[in-house]
Image: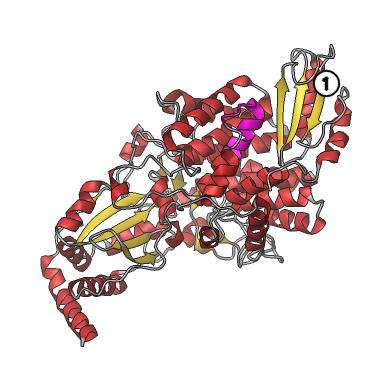
Amino acid sequence: MKYAAIMMTGLALCLASGASAAQSINWNDWELDAFETAKANNRIIVVNVGMEGCAACARMEAITYTDPDVIGLINEHFVAIAVDAEARPDIGDRYSDWAWPATIFLAPDATQVLAVRGNRLPRNFVPILNDLIAKHEAGALEPDPRSPYAAPPKPAETELTRIRDDLRTQIDRSLNRKYGGWGRSGIGGEQSGSRLRHLYLRAHLYDDSELRDLALKSSAGFLLPIDPVWGGTYSAAFPEDMEAPGKFAKLRAIPEKRILVQSNAITAFALGYQHTNDSKYLDGIGEIDRYLKDWRMAPDGTFYTNQKSEPPALPQGMTAGDYWLLPSDKERREFGIPPIDHAVYTDRNGEVITAYVLAYEATGNSDYLETAKKAAQSILDDRLHDDGWVIQALSNDEADKDARMRALVTEERPFLSAQAWFGTALLSLYRATGEDQWLEAADSIGKATLVALQDKELGGFFATVPDATATIIAPRKPLEANGTAASFYYDLWIYTKDDAYKDVPATTIRAVAVPSMIRREGKITGEFAMALEKVTTAYVEFSIVGDTSHRNAKALFDAGRDVFEPRKLLHYEEPGRYPDRGKPVMYICNPDMCSLPIEDPAQVASQAEAFRGPATTVQQ
C-alpha cells in the first residue's frame, strides 16, 4: 500500500509539472545558503556536476534541463545546484565515480539518496524526479550506500609494501593484454597516463620484459585515436580497425579533445620513444604539439581546457563522429569549428607542463622545454597567491565570451589538485634544467600547502580549505590528489633536504590508504600507486657536484637527463655532502649506497644500472 501511494503521488506530480514549469531552472552555486534553504523548506537537493568539454553534459543541458516538465518539477520540489568539476576539483573528485554528467540527489539534510551516471533524456529523467518526490513525501527516502567517502577517521597501519602490492594487483586486473592499456579497448583515456607511468616504472624496476611489452603496447595505443587533420587525440573515440592509427571507418563513442588526454598522449609517446627510438612516437608527440599550439594555447603560453565535440550549428543528420571524419580542414570549416572552452585550469596545466618536460627529456627538442617553461612562468606570474599557493582559475576575455553551460568559477582558495600538480610540474622543470628558480617556487608552494590544506593531526591533505558547507557535507581527502601530493613532497624532500617534508609522503599515504577507499576508486589510482612505489622502493638521486660553469658539469647533467629512471632526481649540488674534487663529478645514490665519483659522462648510464632495483632502506 505504501508503494502504491508513492506511485500515485508521482503520477499526480508528473501530470501537474508542465503547468508549473518556469522558463529555466533556478540553479544555485555550491554554497551554504543553498543547503540551508533546502533544509528550511524540506526540499530534496539535486546537484548537477559536469564540465564544459563534456558532450553528454551539453546534451543534458540543452535537452533535459530545458524541458518544461523537468523545469517545473525541479523548481517546485528541489533546490538545484550546478558545479563545474574542473573549476571546483574538490567537488569534481567527490562525484567522479558517476563520470560526467553526474546527477546527485540529496535529502534535505544533505544525505545522499541517489546518484545517476551520465546523460538522461526527459522521458527517463522525469520518472526519476517523480519517484524521489513521492518517496520524500512518504518518508521513504533512504541513504545511498554508494555515497562518497569522507576523510578517514584514522591513518592506515598496514605495511606500505602490502598496500602497494595489493594496489598493483587491483590495477593489473584491468590490463588489456592484447592491446595494452586498460579496459576493453585498452587505448587512451583520461585515467591512463599515471597508470602507464606506473607500468613503465615497474617494468624498469624489476627488468620485467612482459610488463615492458605491455607498456609499449599501451604507448602505441595512444597513436590510434589521433586526428589526422588537426592533430590532437580524441578522449573517447577509437578506430574500428585497431591496427590502423588515424584511419577511421567510423568514430565510436564521443570524439572530445580534453586537455588531460593530450598530456597523457605526450607522456605515452615520450616514454615509448625513450625505450625504442621509434619515429612513430616522435611523430605522435609532434601531432599533439601541433594541435595544442594551433588550437589550445592561450596568448600567455598556458593551455585552454577543452574543445567541444561538435560545431555550434551541426547540420541535421550529421553526427559529431561524421564531422570529425571529414578529411580536410576546408571541409570541416564549411560546417564551423567546435568551440574551445577558454578556461585555463592550473592543475591541468601542471599535467601538460610535466608531459612537455618528459617530451624534452626523451627527444632533446628544446622547443618542448621552452613551451613548458613559458606556461609555468605565466602561472607563477599571474596565479601565485600572497599566501604562497596557486589559484586554480582566473577569468579571461575569451572565457568571458564563451557560451558556457555555467559561469566560470574563479574562487580565490587553494585546491589540492592545483598545488600538487603544479608543484610536480615545477620539480620536473628543475630536474630537466637544474635551474634553481623552479625548485624555489616548488618549495614555496610546498610550504604554503602544508599550512593551508594539511591535516596536522591525522596527516594527508583536504581537497580544499573546509568552508561553511563542511558542517553539512563532510570534508574529503581525495585519494588521487593525495597520491600526487605525496609524490611531490617526496621529491621535494630529497631535493631540499628539508626535514619539514621528511614524514609528509608516508603520513599522506597512510591518511587515505583505507582499503575500501582504494577499492572504491578502482581505475583512478595511478597517482596513488606511483606515490607508493616511490616511498617503498626509494629515490635514485643524480647529483652533479662542483663548478656548474665548467663544461663537464653540463655534459654530466645531460648524460643524467638521458638515463631512463622513473625515480630519478637530477640536480646540481654545492660541495658539502660530497667533497669538492676540483672538477665536476656526478654521484648516483639511493638510501643504500652511492656510486664512485663519475667524471666521464659516458659512464653515467652504466653506473645508473646498479640502482635499478628497489632499495632496502625504505619505509615498509
Q: Foreground: 19 or 507? A: 507
Left or right of residue 137: residue 555: right
Residue furthest to the left in view is: 19
Q: Residue at x 60, y 43 (%)?
A: 506
- What residue do we see at 78% from left, 15% from top? 546
Does 617 appear above or below 106? Answer: above
Callout 1 amino acid: Val
Q: Residue at x 71, y 45 (%)?
A: 271
Frontmost residue, 540 versus 224: 540
Q: Quadrant of residue 580?
A: top right
Q: Position of residue 110 (x, y in %)?
A: 28, 58
Left or right: where 240 falls relative to 605: left
Colour approach in the figure: secondary structure
Helix, strand or loop at label 1? It is strand
Q: In the image, 597: left or right of 422?
A: right
In the picture of the structure, the residue carrying the numbered disc 1 is: 585
Residue interval drawn in magenta:
487-500
Q: Is residue 508 magenta?
A: no
- Left or right of 204 in this view: 117: left
Across and down, in percent, residue 38 comes to 19, 57
Residue 180 in view: yes
* Membership of 494 in magenta stretch: yes
Q: Position of residue 274 (x, y in %)?
A: 75, 42
Give x and y (percent) for residue 162.
Answer: 67, 56
